[in-house]
Image (tube, grey):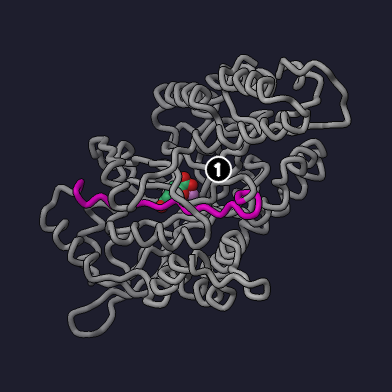
Amino acid sequence: MKSRITSNNPLVAASTIRARFAQAMSSMYRFEVPLYGTLVDMVQQINQRELDNHPELHHDLENTDSIQRISDERHGAIRLGKAEELFNMRRLFAVMGMFPVGYYDLTEAGIPVHSTAFRPVQLDQLNANPFRVFTSLLRLDLIPDQALRTRATELLGQRQIFTSGVLKLIETFEQQQGLYSDQVDHFIAEALETFRWHHHATVDLETYQLFLNSHRLIADIVCFHGPHINHLTPRTLNIDSAQQQMQSVGMQPKAIIEGPPRRSHPILLRQTSFRALDEEILFKSGDGEMQPGSHSARFGEIEQRGMALTPKGRKLYDQLLNEVRAAVPDSINHAAAYRTQLETSFQRFPDELDQIRRQGLAYFNYQIDISYQTDEFNDLSALIDQRIIQAYPITYEDFLPISAAGIFNSNLDQREAQSFSASPNQQAFERDLGCAVINEFDEYARIQQQSLQACLRQLGLDQAAQTLLIHQLESAEL
Ligand code: OOG
Ligand code: NI
């Protein structure tokens, strides 16, 4: 490797680039969408109050090294138009140590895209800065109108969403296996350009409306210079409080919070958003003048993250949520009934950590308290019961397709959501991306196993005893 690493000119850590980029994105968005700033300030206050009022929460977050990350924690979302954009977006995010995790098919919800989330994967990387970007790719193959499809393909073919500067720096990164400090400054400024809002459309109003009538999302993707970041979501420690406060300052949140109900031990992800803003846009016009109009794409969202579920836990979650959705299909107009049904159905999901762990429903980060003495080393449950090994739930770092569809649709202003037949096509997505997506469950399982191995090493167990206890964990005989 022809790296030039020296002690006084080291390559900058990916987590540093990521944190700086997330910060730059947040400043840009605060300036572009002042309501986002209001939301961030509100969440900050709520989080501080939550930590002050719940010392045990504070303690747990501290013990899993995750308290620092929360105030800076954001996810954003972008929508891309063509394969080459997705391919280069993967290379761009790799510079910041963000990799594609998960495949989300949104066609089932009437949205012609499929998606992944770019995010860091190792626990230390997540704790350093967990910035994630939900990234969707338009599926033109699902648009029935041949003429519109051709026009969309032409428009997308003409655009270049990356600056030449950023493309060069990505290449430099790939050759050097990193970037030096001056290159990082340059990279952040150039990369930010791709995510900026554009007040000028690339088409005339008539063309825009044709796409809009086909599907609002297609207009949002096809008629602009680039994939403007459409929201940046802070993480709250109490979403119910935030939802109430949003209402009281006139933000008009969604009627329901997406995801599971409120619980003593939060699972997965709960999200709410306020409606997209209507923003002035200048459209092209035949006589060289610009024609004023508007477009709405950018909205505000907040989320509360709970524990990551195992495939078994996720299956139970999906089953209960489907039951709720079947019982109250129109949650927008029957919010109270939906909430009641959600509470009722989810009573069947255990809400005690010990039960959740013993039933193998969630992933845990094991930490050892070596001030305790024991010689009972052959039973993981006993070690946990004696609190020699503590089990902290691992935070869910991903997204939920039904929630994402709810967020998309609440901002599309089209109640009569179009129906596309469900047609997941992970293979085509991965071909366009240029690699396979990472399986989220594998990542949580690895974090869990590594944490347990570290505990067992600290207890001084020999290999055979370690293997036995790890086997107990894997077979969920807890
Ligand atoms: C993405 C919507 C999904 C989430 O948090 O689930 C999302 C979009 O509207 O582009 O961000
Ligand atoms: Ni979101």
Residue 278 sits above or below residue 331 on the image: below
Q: Is residue 129 magenta?
A: yes
Q: Is residue 474 left or right of residue 411?
A: right
Judge whether residue 356 can be spotted in this image.
no
Residue 39 occupies which quadrant of the picture? bottom right
Residue 217 sits above or below residue 418 on the image: below
- Closer-to-camera residue (402/311): 311
- Residue range corresponding to the magenta coloring: 125-142
Give how far across and how far down residue 172 sits, in percent.
44, 71
**Picture residue at 51% right of the left edge, 51% below the top:** 119
- Identify residue type, mark 1: Glu
Give how far across and how far down residue 52 sits, in percent.
82, 45
Q: Residues within 10 Å of mark 1 (few under 14, many from 20)?
A: many
**Picture residue at 58% right of the left edge, 68% below the top:** 11
- Closer-to-camera residue (274/13): 13
Q: Is residue 399 left or right of residue 125?
A: left
Q: Judge: label 1 CB < 8 Å from ligand 1.
A: no
Residue 392 occupies which quadrant of the picture? top right
- Mark 1 = which residue? 397
**Picture residue at 80% right of the left edge, 39% below the top:** 59
Position of the C terminus, as image quadrant, is: top right
Q: Which residue of the protein is positioned furthest toward the left in this rendering?
A: 146
Identify the element where label 1 is drawn. loop
Give how far across and how far down residue 350 sits, in percent.
62, 19
- Closer-to-camera residue (396/418): 396
Q: Which residue of the protein is positioned furthest toward the bottom in this rendering?
A: 288
Residue 6 sits above or below residue 377 on the image: below
Residue 192 sits above or below residue 391 on the image: below
- Closer-to-camera residue (178/411): 178
